[in-house]
Amino acid sequence: MIRAIDHARLKRIFDKPELARLLERLQTRFERGIDGPTLTLPNPELAERKAITSLLGRPPGSGRSIRITIADLEGVIQRGELAPDLRTAVELLRGPLRDLASEKAAEQQAWQAVFDAIEADVKPQGIEAWLDKLRTDGLLKRLAKGDPNTATILLHQALGVISQLPGQGQTLSTLAASTLGDAHALDSGRPVATLVKRALKKIESSEGLKNEQEENDREQWASAGILVGGAITSTVLVLNLPVENDSLTGNIIHQARQHGEPLWLTLRQLVRDPPQWQVDGRTICICENPAVVAEAADHLETDCAPLVCTYGQPRAAVNHLLSQLQVAGAKLAYHGDFDWPGIIIANGIMRRFGAKPWHFDETAYRQAAANGKMALKGRPVTAEWDVGLTAAMKEKKIAIPEERVLAMLLNSLRLAKEKS
């Protein structure tokens, strides 16, 4: 029986740099509840090897690891009257041992309580899938920095914002101030903003829609009737779009159409005063370059079929308008530059909005490339709607901007108008 515990001697024997790794491994073993007769230390240094084998009373050996029998080590502790057992010795040397299994169980229980407590509030919003995903992907835990209490606050704040959606075209800062008391609480990167945007209908991820984060934010909030920064600078160029003239925006578009005049529409107009589009079953042509719109207005005026311009990579206003037209029953048809960036844009628009090619296939390309001189540069991209187009572009190595086929496009727009 151990008569006394000599703490000072225990520390003198074990509290050495060459035994630090052994003590650390023992601490980990006890805290994690690992049970086993042996412990292995890989790649020991010479001083470490000598200290351990001396402690156990055996030759140093020369292997790539040291294998220690737990019972032998505990026997050294007890025979030397250094501690009642090995666990107590480790606690005396390293401090109180944690019960990691119990801590993990308690943490899991605390996080389960976070989600259970708010489940009834989420159900009326119809976003149970949002909460289910937050349960499993760790986003909420990261935003709350691992604190269940903070997570509960964030969830309630997010639900407070979601309950106010869809908005009626108010600004994001106004929504943030009225629901959270901070005009910047829904700025990009803020925790509540991240949670709310997760709950909104997500923007489809595709090659053709890799805009800057600011534009993604604009579009995502716009889909919920909220304007980022007033949405004045995000615009889309249109010509002759059919619309009811029973609202301010609708009347502006109608008047422009009456005169065959191009018109820039802001995202603000499309969200705050959404037009009543008269496009069910009608084909709406989409081009990439504003030069097509300008030439169509100059030469065709009111005799031009409805036309929308992406002005390169589609931005928030363009995507929002195309979504509105799609919902209103329009048939979308796209033409762009015959180059690799143009194919990327087309892939995105066709995939997302169900657009069909408008003189934008292998046949049209080969006809245009017959007299083309501009070299096709960059990395090839597969045209998802026409793999033959990609093969032809690789073969010809000619880029065809829309301006080179203006005559053909204008004729197509005129004929489409006549048929409508």
Image (tube, grey):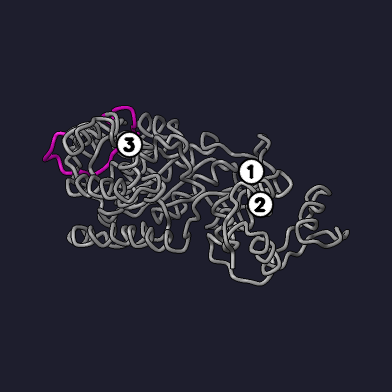
Judging from the image, what secondary structure is the residue with disc 2 in? Answer: helix
Which of the labelled discs sits on residue 392, or is there none? 2
Q: Give the alpha-carbon distance from disc 1 to disc 2, as whole Å.
A: 10 Å
Q: Are marks 3 and 2 in contact (CB under 8 Å)?
A: no
* Region rendered in magenta: 230-248
Q: Give the alpha-carbon distance from disc 3 to disc 2, as whole Å.
A: 31 Å
In this rendering, the answer to whether 253 lies above or below 381 is above
Q: Residues within 10 Å of mark 3 (few under 14, many from 20)?
A: many
Spot the residue most to the front. 3
Q: In this rendering, would 34 be left or right of 188?
A: right
Mark nearer the viewer, 3 or 1 = 3
Q: Nearer the viewer, residue 369 or 319?
A: 319
- In primary-sequence order, the first of circles 3 and 2 is 3
Three-letter code, disc 3: Val
Q: Quadrant of residue 183?
A: top left
Q: Give the alpha-carbon distance from disc 3 to disc 1, as whole Å.
A: 28 Å
Three-letter code, disc 2: Ala
Residue 73's spot in the image, x, y percent?
Answer: 69, 63
In this rendering, the answer to whether 339 lies above or below 204 is above
Residue 99's spot in the image, x, y percent?
Answer: 47, 60
Three-letter code, disc 1: Ala
Image point (67%, 72%), residue name: 37
Q: Which residue is mark 1?
A: 369
Q: Which residue is mark 3?
A: 238
Q: Are marks 1 and 2 in contact (CB under 8 Å)?
A: yes
In magenta segment, residue 241: yes
Q: Is residue 263 visible?
A: no
Mark nearer the viewer, 1 or 2 = 2
- In primary-sequence order, the first of circles 3 and 1 is 3
